[in-house]
Image (cartoon, helix red, strand yellow):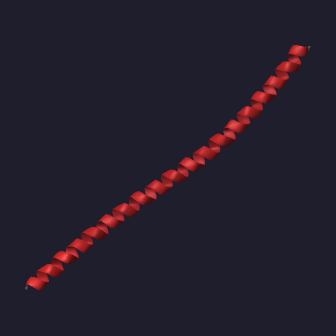
Amino acid sequence: MAIEQVVNASSDLIIEIGKLGNWIQAIGIIVILWALLQIITLIINIKKKRILTEIKKDLRRIENKIDKK
């Protein structure tokens, strides 16, 4: 009888630990997805900055040509 109670208590503990493990996995997946989103956003922003820098250089070049005339 006492052994059955110990077995039931330990099985309940294992079930609760399993639920906790599932929560930790879910949080881990969310963190990984967030990190991937941040990396993608960083890459997009770098490309935008390069394009804006090229446009800025072109505008300066055009302004210099206009000022010379």
x, y percent for residue 64: 85, 19
Residue at the image position 39 percent from the left and 57 percent from the top = 27
Q: How many labels were placed on the picture?
A: 0
Residue at the image position 26 percent from the left and 72 percent from the top = 15
Residue at the image position 58 percent from the left and 45 percent from the top = 41
In this rendering, would 38 be left or right of 1?
Answer: right
x, y percent for residue 16: 25, 68
Q: Give above or below for 57 relative to 37.
A: above
Q: Give above or below for 57 relative to 32.
A: above
Residue at the image position 68 percent from the left and 36 percent from the top = 49
The answer to which quarter of the image holds residue 44 is: top right
In this rendering, would 65 be left or right of 54?
Answer: right
Extreme-left residue of the structure: 1
x, y percent for residue 25: 40, 63
The answer to which quarter of the image holds residue 18 is: bottom left
Which quarter of the figure is the C terminus placed in? top right
x, y percent for residue 30: 44, 55
The answer to which quarter of the image holds residue 51 is: top right
In this rendering, would 57 be left or right of 16?
Answer: right
In this rendering, would 48 be left or right of 31?
Answer: right
Which quarter of the figure is the N terminus placed in? bottom left
